[in-house]
Image (spheres, rainbow, N blue to C red):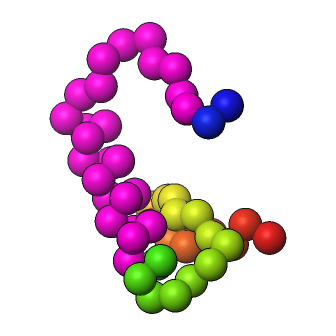
Amino acid sequence: PTYMIRAIPSNASDNVYCTLLVHSAVHGAMAGYLGFTVGPVNGRHAYIPIY
């Protein structure tokens, strides 16, 4: 699905995590990267190629 269904309301930790993901995605897009997603890899946020 294009969205995640939550059984409980989001908390402050969810807000911080989503903000970090969005900032990473925007920085990658502004740097000219295409075909990637962002996520944690070994405790650090990284650009992950989709193809």
Residue at 40 percent across and 57 percent down: it is: 21
Query: Residue 7: image x %, image y %?
Result: 44, 11
Residue extending farthest right: 51
* Quadrant holding the C terminus: bottom right
User: Relative to the observer, which residue lies in front, 34 or 24?
Assistant: 34
Let me know if residue 17 is in the magenta part. yes
| Quadrant containing the N terminus in the rendered view | top right
Seen from this angle, which residue lies furthest left?
A: 12
Residue 12 falls within the magenta-colored stretch: yes
In the image, residue 38 lies at what x, y percent?
52, 63
Res 42 seen here = no
Q: 26 left or right of 32?
A: left
- Magenta range is 3-27
Count of marks, rendered view: 0
Above or below for 20 versus 44: above
Image point 30% across, 25% down: which residue? Answer: 10
When the figure is inspected, residue 2 is found, relative to residue 30, above or below; the finding is above
Query: Overall secondary structure of the magenta stretch?
Result: helix
Residue lying furthest top in this view?
7
The quarter holding residue 20 reads: bottom left
Q: Residue at x 38, y 77 (%)?
A: 27
Residue at 62% across, 70% down: 36
Residue 16: x and y, percent?
25, 47
Q: Is residue 15 left or right of residue 46?
A: left
Q: Is residue 15 visible?
A: yes
Residue 15 % position (x, y): 26, 41
Tell me which corner region of the image, top left, top right, bottom left or bottom right, holds residue 43.
bottom left
